[in-house]
Every structure is written in C-alpha cells, then in structure tokens.
Image (spheres, rainbow, N blue to C red):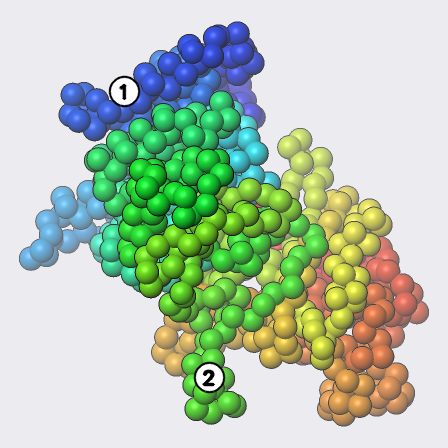
Amino acid sequence: MKKITTLLTIVLLQTATLFAVNENDTLSKQKQCFYDAKTEIENMLSGKIPLDYERAVFITENAYWNNKVDYTLFQIVIDFHSKNIKNLAEANRNEKEQNFKATLLETVEQKREKYQNLLYNWAIFTYFTDTTILKTTLNDKNYIFHHLPYEYSFNDPLGVLDWKNSQVFNLLDKNKANCYAMTSFFKILAERLKTDASIGIAPGHVYITHIDQKGTHYNIELANRAFPGAGSIMTLTYTPVEAVRNGIAMRTLDSKQSVALCLIYLAKGYEHKFNAKTDDFLYQCAETTLKYDSLNLNAMLLKAEVLEEKIVKSNKTVAQLQTNKEFKEYQNLIVILFENGYREMPLDMKNLIINRLQRDSLGLILTDHTPKGFQTINPKDDRYATLSWGMFDEIHEPKLIEQYGRTLLNTKTKKITKFVTADSLYNKYPIDPVVFAWQIDPLASKYPNMSPYAAFNNNPIYFIDDDGREGVASVKKNADNSGGTVTIKAVYFVEVGPNGFSKEQYQSIMGINQTLNSQNYTITDENSQYKGYNVQFDLQIVAVPSQEKAQSYAVSEKELTDAGANAGINLLASNLPIGNSMILTEQTEFEAIPSVQETAKQNNVGPSAVLGITSSDLQHINIPSKSGSTLFTILHEVFHTLYTDKDGATSGIGAGKSLPNESDINDMMKGFENNNRVVTE
C-alpha cells in the first residue's frame, strides 16, 4: 500500500506551476478577474444563481491568481479531504453508547441526526487540529494518508505582508494560513458534510460556531484547539456590549451573509495585488455587501478605510472639507460605527496581541488595566477583577474623543475634529481592521474546559495545559521516527517595576532560552523512551507591574479545580490565567520568610546565604534583592519549577553557579514524565 506523507494529494501537485505563471497577463485582464468574481457573487446574492459558499471562496481567491486554478481540480481536492473526514467520523461512530430514547420533545431519529451533526463537526475539528493517519483511495489506488494539523500564520496573522496567508489555497498548499482561511475551509467542509457549523464574527476575529447534542452553542477556535466563551472573545477583541446588542459583533452568519463576506476578502485581495487603497472596486464591494447584510462590520470598516484614504490624500483641513461630499459620507459612517458600539482597539492592546502572535522573545512591559471601582470611596478597596485579570482594558468608559484609524471623532458633537498620523505599532506590523483573522491569545485568558465533543470521549475533553503555561514537555517525533525534539514550555509572570526586577534585569531574564538552547542539550538516559531526542526551551517571560499581579496570574490548574469543587462551580471555565510567578523581595524581608529560614537550617548556613526559593507547589519563585541580577540563580529556581531538585550538587544546575548538565536534563525529563506533563505534537 502506498503512503502519502505530504499535505496535498497527488492531483494538487499539478497546481504547483500555476502559482508562478500569473504575471504575463495584462493589468486589465488581471483586474477583470476580480470584476467577474464580483458579478458572480452578486448573482448569488440576488438569487439569479444558487448560493454556493465553496464556489464563492474559490472565485474570490482564484481572481488573485488570474483565474489560473481549475475549479474541477479544486473540487477534487475538497472531495478528497471530505472523504477522509467522513471516514474518520464513521470510524468513531458509536451510537450504542448514546442510548437514544424518544422524549416528548424529540424522536429517536431527531436525536440520531443531532449526533451525526456533532460527530461530523468533531471529525472536521480533529482533522484540522490533530495528526491523523487514514486509509484512503485516489484514482482507484489505495494509500495511507498522513495528515498533519494545520498551522496558524503567526508571523503574518492578518495577511498584510503576504495576502496568500488569508487564502484556503495557501492552507491546502502550505498547510498554514490565518483564522479566516481556516474558518472558510471548515465552513466549506461543513457544507459538504451537511453539518450546522456557521461562521462567527467579532471585531478582528472570525471563528466557527455550532451546537452540541443538547443544543448548547460553542465557539470553536481552530488555531489553538480551544472553545472560548462569548465573554472571552469580547474581552480579547475589545468588543463593548453595545456592539453585541446592536448586532454588529458576536454575530453568527447565515448562508447569504457568509457569501456576502467573500466580497470583502475579494476587495482586499484586489487591494493587495494592485496596491490600490482608493480604487472604486473596493468601495463597490463594501456597498454591495451592505446591501445584502446591512450590519456587516467588515464592510463598514472597508468603506470607511477607502473614504479616509481618499480624504487624507486630498491634504485638506477639516474646515476645508466641510462641503466635501466624501467627507460628509465618511463622517456619517464613523458616527454610525460609534453609535453601534464599535471601538477601535487601544494601541497597547494591539501591541500586546502582535507580540504574542509573533512569539517575539523580547516581550512587553504590561500595564495593569484592572479598574478601581470603589477606590474613590475607600482607597484600599481593590476587590475588582476582570476576565483578563488586568491585561486589557475591559471597561469601555465614555471618551470625549474616539480615534478610528487616523480620524479623531468628538463623541459629543458627533463631528470629526482632526486627522492624525497613524500609530506606530509593535515591530511595525500594519494592522488592518477590515481583515478579521486574529487568533485568540491563549496567554491572555483561560478558556472554558468544556468541549462540544464530549460524546466521542465518554467524558468532556478538558483543556489541559498542553500549551505549557504551568510547564510541559512537548514531544515531536521526526518524520522518519529517528528521534525527535522535546520542547520545554512554561510561562513566568515576572514582577518588573520599582519594587521588582529592573528593566535591565528583566531583559537579562529574557535571555534564558537563548542561553539554554545554545548548549544543544540531548536526552541521554538509557532508560528513557526519549533517548537521543534534542531538547529545546521555549520559556515565555511576561512582565507584570506588581508582586500581587505576578502571583495572582500564577494560578495552577489544580488550584482552580480544587477551589471550584469546594465552591460548587467550574472555575476552569472562568478565564483565570495559568502560569508561574517570579518576584523580587527586599533582602531583610526575604530572610524572614519561614521557608528561607528552614532551607538555611537544613544546609547549615545563614538565611543570607539562600539565593532564591521556590514554593512547594513548584510554581512561585522568590529571589532576594542581592541576587536578583544573577542569571544562574534564576536558572536554578526555574529548574525547580521544571521538576528538577538538585540542591547541594557540586556541579550542574544544583550548584547554583553553572548551567544544567547532562544529568540535570535527564532528571528534568523524568520529572515531566512522572508528573504526567508530557504531550505529543
């Protein structure tokens, strides 16, 4: 039996040359491809031809490629993936366990239909997010198909550097794309398999939504295999409740609205291909979309973007623009956006999200946005928490001036007051508010542990901390099974500020990964199943402004589970963050800590000789001020949180003055295995 180890089927390989022969057409012919696609989508929306989301996505993307991709070939590829997913679903069908019984509200057949709907949604989700090995056929030949999970385009989440990152074509060809492409492909497959999955929309974000067997709605985050609640999505997309009430955010799109959305991405493809920000084609696409979906936020923002660009290019003052027709239209549109509850994400929030998405090693100094609701009455009363625990500003207080792009709007007079220079963003990555393709950042909140796919695992699929916030060893085998790589992942919330580590010390701590990875560690333990595997470190260091914040962020999964059980509630579904803390304590105060004194006594030294301490739950690191700048001390305590206790050793990490040695790495891996903190990619 033959084996397919690449993402694409054999037939898709025929498209490889198509992506390199697009420049010979004349400019007018290239643009005509977009106008033809627009006309066909308009015919769908007007009822002249049937609505077809798969076809709408295809012609939208094919226009970017000068209509060089054959639709029949595209359908063959979708057929192939659909068949694989159907086979995966049927292999996991287990109706006996469901014990279907008729009730006053539902027949047995209706229950079976709901089960099949959920089963097929689960199969699509699994195909997207997990490695699957399937027997399949192609051109009457048998194959073993090895399908790898799709990857999120972290370096270019909005497709502004390379628009192909927003295309299903790219997902099929490169196995990588942004949330919009992933969501579009899921929707195409859902329609093929006749499930209820729909596209969900929030400012800057697009996702899948569907119901489980009980009728509960779930939001599906494909990029990180999570199921965020509405509150999480609203928090992380800066969505006021007014935007939800007015119907422009947290929307579930029907078939016509989903097809209409394709016009916006057709316009964006046109803009990127021809570098045309003010072309009338973009405006027409926005207007047509709004004709068939008046609450489409993408269309409103696209229209605003085109008008603003034209107005700014005119190089006139606001006073000079008062009689300008386009200015009046633009001002009216901005007021509509404001009154409907849309607020542009603040600069520091944009920077934080870009930093997380691009996985930058430098990190950012976080501002504490926790509101102080009662401090005007009682300055000491800080009993106030938010879903993001202060990472983001979640209180949308009224502002006299709101900024939209380069436009300042007086919210009292409902008049534009000024045009300003666009904000300079982190890494100079240009954010396009029209393109909804953010990945919801897993470091910013704790997702609900409940899954819609409980029926296929007997118990709910709990969101275990496999992204490594508490600490996890992530194993990835080589394709030929000749060893692999173990990546040690964990998150540390570090106190940075007047009473904590200095910015210089923080930057030094940020160098931990580079220092460790330069040693090229390998597991050498003869008794380990991972012998010969390379070891890499991916420790994320997040600055927070206070000791209290560092320690409150560092909540363990066990703590949430135990506390929730005692209170009779599900705290794991509450967005509380998970991670480890690292704080700096004044020397005298540090020496007075009971655990420090106990450690000193056990080692026959004075408390001043103790250079750091880690809590018994291996989650909280405390460093005295005199040793705060010593990287070896930090590493020694970090390895305690990674299940390595070598205190008193004469060499290696236990000595406190050297890097980990071979024995330390072997013991660390053994600790991860003994504590069930090993996951397989």
Residue 551: give x, y in percent of width and height: 61, 76
| 346 shown above or below 533 | below
Question: 255 or 112: which is nearer to us?
Answer: 255
Residue occupying the point 57% across, 34% down: 161
Q: Is residue 624 visible?
A: yes
| Residue named by callout 2 | 383
Residue type highlighted by circle 2 = Arg
Residue occupying the point 65% across, 40% down: 477
Residue 388: give x, y in percent of width and height: 48, 66
In the picture, the quarter occupied by the C terminus is top right
Residue 123, by quadrant, is: top left
Residue located farthest toward the front when viewing the structure as drawn: 320
SS assignment at label 2: loop
Q: Is residue 185 visible?
A: no
| Residue named by callout 1 | 39
Report the side of 431 relative to 328 (left or right): right
